[in-house]
Image (tube, coloured by chain):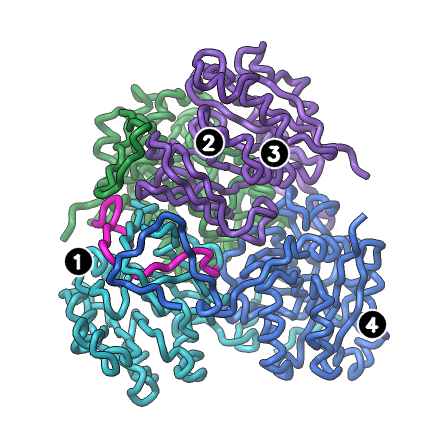
Chain colours: A green, B purple, C cyan, D blue
């Protein structure tokens, strides 16, 4: 019925080229795996990576992007500030953003949250149970009460984020930690989802439940309207209320 | 009983030196007026301004600041990014921040909100009524149902901010606009209040009700604990859960 | 593509039968007018009114209701507590609820909010401007920055509601008041929208923008999943974590 | 300096009289233990129990209560609706409410939340770790990153509550569950804290960290002002905006 959503899957794509253990899991890169796993008739998916010109996020690409997914880890600092600003402006204008796993410390996520987004972590291949706290929410549709992951990297509280608008998942880890693994925020006209699972050596992005949540998140963060945020108050139109008589001694500037 | 709160009142201090109409209202600068108006036995107030070295916000000054109030307007862009980062880190570590009036577009406020913080505006000396939506909240204590300002600059929605944690005041303007004039957020360990009234040519900062709210905000945003946010996950301590046996094939990094 | 949403438009239907001035505006009742105004291929609309058996809200009717809209005013107290409980349980299980105008003091709304939902009011045919604070939200789609109503009953703050999850509209009234006219909450699996405009003698429910918002609200509150909330913890399944060894001295009850 | 806070510790007080294993832990009842544990110069504590006349919550007692703590379990249904309404009105007018453990299904908590407040549970004496998600919040002051309880009853998600305003603690249970163990809401002028730990056979109310949190919660929920909520819109004063001329054809009712 309607046009497909245009999704850009962004990936740092360094681990997969530099480390054999990662290459073994994601030979074509996490972005390629995600693009395959999310493939559906209602989605038109492209990928972009750090080492492409402008990190693959040119104005032209973003003009054709409804939702951006973000995976980064070792090279957060190499993402240019001007590209971060460009992406932020798109989110504020309505583009959806789905931040995955170690993307919690991506500049774009910190920019939109205003906090460090730091957390505790441990790489111990321990069991993770993601409890669904929001069974009514479109992003959790179809995954039931709990997602059971036999071996995962641990992320633990305190996760330094603003109080989420909706808290979707809380993870339990065998080693004793808990974590807000799925959460949503609105910034400007843009919807943002953070979703924890995913790591360069655990094959999370072939897990159907994980892919289901990411697919849900992509569809839910899609923009609702052709809205635009004025960049500064100087761009904002003045209001003229018919019938309102302005006191003579004041002029309306602008 | 307890030590006084250490408050730093920051002001851009340009309008007051450059325009005679502003000088007439605030001959010593908005910061001096605010410092006088807020003076109380439980507060130890100092001031800082844009054109001082490091904008008056050296590490030494911030070491002795529990709460920072911020007024800026024409020179937001002259505030150095490194000082903005320094202030942001302090807020995340627990310092209170009270953003006043045109400070809505200050870099520090945009940094913490993640949005443009843009709005509509009109300078027409029109009547403003601030309705108290949170009579239970410490920041509105003592001001009753409504603050009535006979002549004010108009700020209008849509104000591009994240959904406030507590919406304290909504303003009515004679010309037909409404505005979320008082609101709170938490970022890291820091509490943030935005409060609208105040302008370089309307003597808002001599109005006892306005000063009451700002004083309340200063006291409410004061840090609760000597908390510190880890700057990145690498600084975060690992968790050792007694009794948790880590699978042999994994090492605990760090 | 999908089955139409099943909407039940509930109305007290007393004013329209008892007062000639109301009958002149809504000769068939507010419910009939709303049903006509909301008519669309994706909605299957029925109506129900207070004086029908079980207020028209039998288990059978609710079994076939995805979203319920509620208009009441003079006879809130005549709504039987057992029917309120029945509707509440449906909302918690996922049914959408759209509360209109004077429905702010309906038992069902008070039940779900936990507060009095009281407000200020004045019947003075004054101008109302509804400012759109959430241009990104599906419920505000298509109405632009502002809805202009030349003559309306006034509702004013403080509106005694829990802090909304999304604040959609704030109204400006010519007489000096403001009001949170559109807001959303989640309770259990159910989405709730409150929308202010509408009155027994102002023909709000023939205004295309007002109908647009109500139609949006109906579609947005529709349940996302066939979810059910356990009525008490005794109905809740016990969790059996494979591999978890329960201390011998404790038995698992149930 | 200021008068002590007047705290009423309410307890069902049935388990302690009927079961020897409970009597062994709390010989004088949970209320007596809590009153002892919370004793401090700034608190004036009394107790009240279910089987007293009016459940010990007469108008006279509530007139002298700033904060009420609530523990109930097996006899929730015996609490009279009129007393629940009385307590609810007090909370809406500003009285603080601290709901403990199995009080999650107390009528008063359900009334204020609008939901079932149901959850999963298991009595298996398993380890619980309460992670502090809000180190900046007055209610968590002094307890550090984590409270470690060697043997506790399990409460698990999904906890059917409205999204908390501040999420304070998330619990980890050895058996694989997580739970939002500390959370806050505002209803009317009243602050509400839910805090999970506590059970009739685990001596939680002698644990200094648990008592610390409850004491913090009592102090934080204390009313800020002598505020009162109008019971219905008919009690609400009309607004007379000086200078506003009402259209002739409309009368201001009331």
The quadrant the N terminus of chain B occupies is top right
| Label 3 crowd bin: few (<14), some (14–19), many (20+), radius 10 Å | many
Q: Does the magenta stretch include residue C152?
A: yes
Q: Is residue A74 magenta?
A: no
Q: In this view, does A138 lie above or below C51?
A: above
Disc 4 on helix, strand or loop? Answer: loop
- Magenta-tinted stretch: C139-161
Give me the disc on residue D26. Answer: 4
Q: Are marks 3 and 4 in contact (CB under 8 Å)?
A: no
Q: Are marks 3 and 1 in contact (CB under 8 Å)?
A: no
Image position, residue B125 (x, y; %): 37, 32
Please name which of the two marks, 2 or 3, marks the residue nearer to the observer.
2
Looking at the image, which residue is at 50% across and 32% down? B204
Give me the disc on residue B101. Answer: 2
Disc 1 on helix, strand or loop? Answer: helix
Return the residue at label 1: C208
Please name which of the two marks, 4 or 2, marks the residue nearer to the observer.
2
Image position, residue A195 (x, y; %): 44, 45
């Amino acid at each position: 019925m309607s046009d497909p959503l245009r999704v850009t899957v962004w990936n740092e794509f360094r681990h997969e080229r530099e480390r054999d253990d990662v290459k073994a899991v994601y030979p074509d890169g996490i972005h390629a795996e995600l693009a395959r796993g999310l493939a559906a008739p209602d989605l038109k998916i492209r990928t972009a990576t750090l080492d492409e010109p402008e990190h693959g996020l040119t104005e032209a690409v973003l003009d054709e992007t409804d939702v951006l997914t973000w995976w980064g880890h070792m090279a957060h600092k190499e993402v240019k500030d001007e590209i971060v600003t460009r992406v932020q402006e798109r989110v504020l204008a309505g583009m959806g953003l789905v931040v995955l796993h170690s993307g919690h410390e991506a500049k774009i996520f910190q920019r939109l949250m205003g906090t460090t987004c730091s957390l505790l972590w441990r790489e111990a291949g321990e069991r993770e149970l993601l409890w669904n706290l929001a069974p009514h929410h479109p992003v959790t549709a179809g995954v039931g009460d709990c997602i059971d992951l036999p071996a995962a990297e641990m992320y633990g509280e305190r996760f330094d984020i603003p109080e989420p608008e909706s808290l979707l998942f809380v993870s339990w880890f065998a080693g004793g930690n808990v974590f807000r693994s799925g959460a949503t925020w609105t910034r400007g006209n843009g919807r943002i989802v953070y979703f924890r699972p995913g790591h360069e050596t655990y094959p999370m992005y072939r897990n159907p439940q994980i892919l289901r949540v990411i697919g849900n998140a992509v569809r839910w963060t899609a923009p609702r309207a052709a809205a635009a945020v004025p960049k500064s108050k100087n761009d904002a139109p003045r209001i003229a209320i018919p019938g309102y008589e302005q006191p003579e001694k004041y002029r309306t500037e602008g």
